[in-house]
Image (cartoon, rainbow, N blue to C red):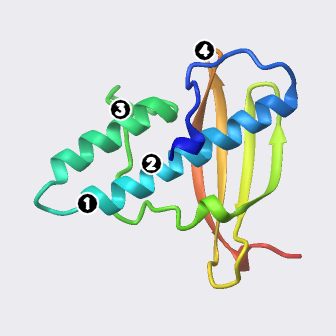
Amino acid sequence: MNNYELDLQKTKFANDEELKSYLITLVLQFASYVNNLDFKYFSKDNFQEFKENYLKLFNNYCTEKRKQKGSKVYYISSKGRFGEIEKAIVKFFYLQKRQAEIGFFPTVEEYLDCYKFDLRKENNIWRINNIKNLQWKDFVF
């Protein structure tokens, strides 16, 4: 995980390449931490500790979602692992002024999950806004 450490509050980037590198690293760091939490904490006996650690990740890496009544919404799942995302390649990267989209595809055939991360810039800070787990069958080549 130390390979991915970065300043989560960074707001200034020299150019689009530096920003692209930062956003990809942000996603990989988040996915790596989620993978470690899922393996380390998830069980009925220690769900509260798992939840607290998971919420820290959401607060640090993700945009805030709110229900109509104003309370925060977080999705917690034992299936929230990102497989071997560290070995995946970035298949697409789209950057607009305040939004970015990154697609990770596997490098080996046995691993069939693909991920699309949507990022958003809020208060000048980049955060993950949405994550989709895609399957190879969803793509037409």
Sequence-first disc among 2 and 3: 2
Q: Residue at x 44, y 48 (%)?
A: 33
Q: Nearer the viewer, mark 2 or mark 3?
A: 2
Q: Where is residue 36 shown, x and y percent of the image?
A: 39, 55
Amino acid type, mark 2: Tyr
Q: In which quarter of the image is the C terminus?
A: bottom right
Q: Residue at x 78, y 20 (%)?
A: 13
Q: Residue 42 carries which label?
A: 1
Distance, label 2 to label 3, CA atoms, is 21 Å
Q: Do the residues labelled 4 and 1 touch (CB within 8 Å)?
A: no
Residue at numbered disc 2: 33
Distance, label 4 to label 1, CA atoms, is 33 Å
Sequence-first disc among 2 and 1: 2
Q: Quick one: label 4, few (<14), some, or many (20+) residues within 10 Å?
A: few
- The answer to which quarter of the image holds residue 98 is top right
| SS under mark 4 | loop
Amino acid type, mark 4: Asn
Q: Which of marks 3 and 1 is in front?
A: 1
| Residue 111 in sight from this viewpoint | yes
- Asked if 69 appears above or below 101 in the picture, the reply is above
Q: Which of marks 2 and 4 is in front?
A: 2
Q: Nearer the viewer, mark 4 or mark 1?
A: 1
Q: Residue at x 53, y 67 (%)?
A: 83
Residue at numbered disc 3: 72
| SS under mark 3 | loop
Distance, label 3 to label 1, CA atoms, is 21 Å
Q: Quick one: label 2, few (<14), some, or many (20+) residues within 10 Å?
A: some
Residue at numbered disc 4: 123
Q: Where is residue 132 shown, x and y percent of the image?
A: 60, 57
Distance, label 4 to label 3, CA atoms, is 18 Å
Amino acid type, mark 3: Lys
Q: Where is residue 4 shown, x and y percent of the image?
A: 59, 41
